[in-house]
Image (cartoon, grey):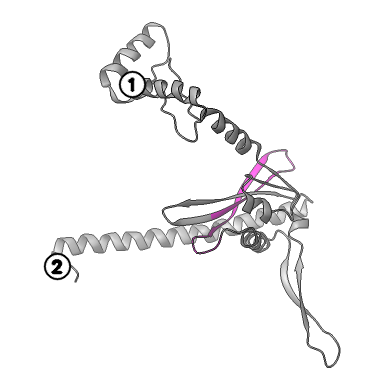
Amino acid sequence: MLPQLTADQRDRLHRKIVLWLTVVDIVVALSVEGKIKVKRALQELAQEGILPSIGGDIWSQGGIAIFGILVYWIDSNFQYQERLVSAIPFSAVRHSGAKLQEATKKACATMGIGVLSEVLHTAGEWEEEEPSMVDTVADSIHCTVSDNAANIVNAWNCFDGFECTDHTVALGVKAFLEQHRVKKVFAKLRGMTGHFNHSIIGVKLLNECQKRNNLAETKPPQDNDTRYRNIQVH
């Protein structure tokens, strides 16, 4: 049974719902506009005879998964360009190589990168028409870049491509940081940086010392997965 709401609570709830619906409408409108612009850019790219490259990955958190595909290229003025081709809901889909490949080709074809369609070929007079798939997506892509997860590697094995160097290096760095002696050093450094991130007096003394030595007034950054435990003590 729903709780009874006061008039003021109902009014606030109504405003929140209206605001949420307004935001959704704006996001959808911008999404449509963005797709049109990306498709136009890819059409101009095709006219120049330039094949785009693609990169992609699955982002998952809190039971929500999205498969993002990015297209990028060097234009005729030698400027790096990148566009989001698609952000596909993948929460209710198996993250298998076959499903990722299917989603990739459909997303690319929808934006004009190659053709992916089923055609019927007329057989003999008394025979049924035989369907076949026209697929030129792979021929319309220069190369792909992904991490080295088995599913995305299997999904994109139909394209010319490479595994991301940064991701591979990150795995190597992570393995190094898991070594026992290294972990002990970083545990001590983490305690030092934690002090400056929690102690107002400590930060004040640090900044005074930095100021006396003509250094920028900063505090050591705390490590996280994207900084590779890049703890610095100045």
Residue 180 at x, y percent in the picture: 49, 26
In what quadrant of the picture does the C terminus appear?
A: top left
In the image, residue 33 sits, relative to residue 231, either above or below, namely below
Residue farthest front in this picture: 180
Q: Secondary structure at mark 2?
A: loop
The mark found on residue 40 in the picture is none
Residue shown at 15%/65% (left/top)? 5
Foreground of the two, 216 or 203:
203
In the image, residue 46 sits, relative to residue 228, either above or below, namely below
Residue 147 at x, y percent in the picture: 62, 44
Q: Does 158 sit left or right of 35 as displayed?
A: right
Q: Dot 2 surroundings within 10 Å: few (below 14), some, or many (20 or more)? A: few
Foreground of the two, 47 or 182:
182
Q: CA distance from mark 1 to mark 2?
A: 48 Å
For badge 2, the amino acid type reads: Gln
The mark found on residue 196 in the picture is 1
In what quadrant of the picture does the N terminus appear?
A: bottom left
Quadrant hosting residue 140: bottom right
Residue range of the region highlighted in magenta in the rendering: 67-94
Disc nearest the viewer among 1 and 2: 1
Residue 225 at x, y percent in the picture: 48, 35
Residue shown at 72%/74% (left/top)? 118
**Tally of numbered tags:** 2
The mark found on residue 4 in the picture is 2
